[in-house]
Image (tube, rainbow, N blue to C red):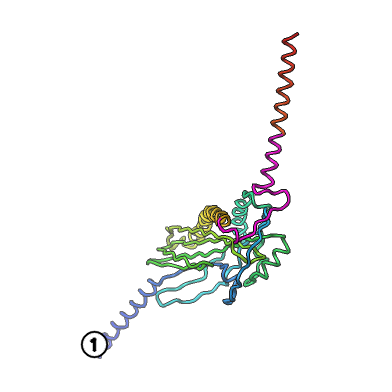
Amino acid sequence: MNTFLNHHCRILALLCCVILLASCASSREFRARSSVVDYLYPNKTKAIKPSVPTLNLPLNVGIAFVPDETSRSHNRSIFNTIRSGQTLPESKKAELLETIAEHFRLQPFVNSIEVIPSAYLTPGGSFANLEQIQTMYGIDVIALVSYDQVQFTDEGLLSFSYWTIVGAYVISGEKNDTQTMMDTAVYDIKSRKMLFRAPGVSQVKGRATPINLSEELRQDSLKGFDEATREMIKNLDQQLELFKQKIKKHPEQAVIKHRPGFSGGGAIHLAEILILAVLVVTLLAFRYRRDKTLSSSDIS
């Protein structure tokens, strides 16, 4: 009898060890995201074919983060658990939007840029919501910013997929890695046409111990957003140049018009040329009068 009990006790102990090891080896992920796809086409709404955009230069541009995805937590398997992470704080969103906005302000084709609070974009609001914002702010196009961040907190080769309008990115990760994807899609609101888009990716290697894991993950999260934003801005320059070249080669894809006082290079450039011309004429007139005065002195 004792032999039978000892045998079953060993089996029970072995099972407990297996369960304990499995729980220790479980793969945990913390994820926070927002999606342009979910915002513009909620509940798998059928996409409406866009019309040919008419771009009145210089443009009035809006920029905003699309709404965050509702936090959720679920078990992917006994060995892999995903948990909702902290969404990007509004203060950090405002900081990142201002960084992107400064880049747009440097473009000669931009007349003004409005940073739009997240509260004005409703989840699943689609183009009807964008038309409301267009009326409120008087903008022509809008840059919609989205993000996807996953933080892996244990061993193993892990990955996540980030779905965009044009497809998916798959990024792998390791222990305590923070993987961040930022994406900006620029839309002409009236025609519902996406003009161009640019992604930015960051990978922050984690070095956290169990004691400071929470604080380390928070710092890695903010660092990931900063790095991904910088890369995204670099890609915006490239995509903008590609967009310009595409319009030149295929003018039927967009109608380009100029507002009064704007002549392609920008009204600011024209004003600078006029000011420079006035300065040159003034300098030449001054030198002419000085030389004439010196000549009169020599004669006398």
Position of 199 relative to 293 (above/below): below
At 43% from the left and 59% from the top, the residue drawn is 208
Q: Position of residue 15 (x, y in %)?
A: 33, 80
Magenta-span inclusion, residue 274: yes
Q: Position of residue 42 (x, y in %)?
A: 59, 74
At 44% from the left and 70% from the top, the residue drawn is 28
Q: Which of the pair 179/27 is nearer the observer?
A: 179
Q: Which residues are magenta?
A: 249-277
Quadrant for the C terminus, please: top right
Give the structural element (helix, strand or loop) at label 1.
helix
Q: Which of the pair 172/294 is nearer the observer?
A: 294
Position of 235 relative to 131 (above/below): above
Q: Position of residue 250 (x, y in %)?
A: 57, 59
Q: Which of the pair 57/44 is nearer the observer?
A: 57
Of the residues shown, which amino acid type is indicated by label 1? Thr
Question: Is residue 221 rendered to the left or right of residue 94?
Answer: left
Which of the 4 image quarters holds residue 245? bottom right
Q: Position of residue 139 (x, y in %)?
A: 69, 60
Q: Which residue is situated farthest in the left direction here?
A: 3
Q: Kindly tell me whether residue 214 is visible in this rendering.
A: yes
